[in-house]
Amino acid sequence: MDATSPTSPYLFDGSFTLRGCSAYEGFSNADFYRSSFRVETRDGHWRTLTNAERFGLVSSLYGPGNLLGWFFLILSVLISWTANPVSRRKDTITNDFIAVLTMPVVAVVHFFYMVAQQRGKTIKGWLGCRQELDVIAVGALEAPLTVCEDFIACAAVLFSVAASRGHPRRLALVLCVGLLCLAPEVLLLVEWLPYGSGSLLRPFIFHSAFFFCSLILWESLTLLVYLAEIFSTVSVAAAERLGIRTRADAERGHGAKFGLRMLSPGYLASRMSAVSAFVAAAGSIWIKYGLLLQMGAFNSVRFIPRSPFNVLDLDQAIAAAGGLVALGFSVQGAFKERKKARERQQRHEMPPWQRWGR
């Protein structure tokens, strides 16, 4: 069947160059990104599949209200880590941070569960199939994959903030969940299908092999450096317990303090990857929204996956409101702690007779 025939599901008339993969593809904004998609039914006929049918199996977990609430929680965590003096100083694991990490972990598990349900099918054959049931199943698969890529972009910011503050527990959790979110991308890269030949609505990071491999190398290097810092810290602590003294241990003053900071987990890793993290996040956005797609399709590509749900639905509105309330409490807590810190500093700067007189 000719790709340009009226009955073909591939009604592609545009073209673009995927520089990272050196792949040449074509697509049509008029048919591929709007309200319909042509699929083959069981009896061999072609029919138009609307978006309501195509994304009918998407779970309400990935609805716009839940995703907005999740983004509000991410912003709440960032405010706590940067603007709250107490949370900025302590390496604590708060409830909102656990909720932020839970969403991508559930998305990864859900992704592999849906892949496992397609018994006897390869990933490439499944994504490239135009059978009606397969296209609907791929539409449901796209939602958890979108959440994974959203967290990869957010993890770059969370990692830089946690590492710059010297918080090893926060840094380790963000790094582990970020690597976990790369697992679906690795699977899809192994079973690579050119964008435009599959039934995915939007492009993902794995469509650019060059950028994706660079991201994997950055994550691996960061993990190795972090593990090396942990091993060095444990070795120095064990040597001190045994009474072993080195020349560095005998130094005093600024040099010794600088050496202790250099041995803290996350110190070197944060300096190595702080700039690279933001470059990786910006690069992923540029590849998906600038390199692969024409500007006419920009409104169809977003951080919230397509679903049959509306943000005004009761469950979605409650989820979004819950995240907004958590963000409000985070801002309020940051203001309170900063006010207390200023008051303590003012009392500390007062003469003793004025300090105790209050």
Image (tube, rainbow, N blue to C red):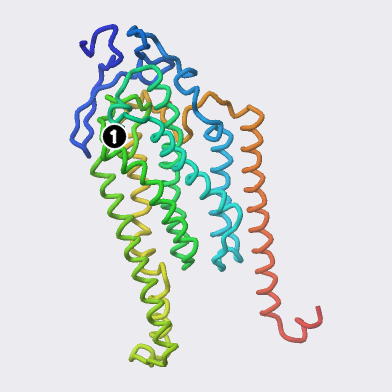
Q: In which quarter of the image is residue 202?
A: top left
Q: In which quarter of the image is residue 121?
A: top left
Depth check, front residue: 69 or 1: 1
Q: Is residue 307 left or right of residue 191?
A: right
Question: Where on the picture, by quarter, is residue 118?
Answer: top left
Identity of the residue drawn at 40% across and 11% down: 48
Q: Residue at x 56, y 26 (%)?
A: 309
Name the residue tied to disc 1: 291
In this rendering, position of residue 171 left or right of residue 196: right
Q: In this view, does 311 lie to the left or right of 186?
A: right
Q: Is residue 30 above or below residue 148?
A: above
Numbered disc 1: secondary structure: helix
Instruction: Return the residue nearer the eye: 332 or 138.
Output: 138
Quadrant containing the N terminus in the rendered view: top left
Query: Where residue 65 appears, x then y in whole percent?
Result: 58, 34
How far across and down, in percent of the image, does residue 209 sit? Answer: 24, 41
In the image, residue 173 sits, relative to residue 14, either above or below, namely below
Within 10 angstroms of label 1, few (less than 14), some, or many (20 or more) residues? some
The residue at the point 35 percent across, 17 percent down is: 131
In the depicted structure, whether residue 149 falls above or below residue 342:
above
**Residue 34, percent across and down?**
41, 18
Amino acid identity at mark 1: Leu
How many labels were placed on the picture? Answer: 1
The residue located at (59%, 29%) in the rendering is 311
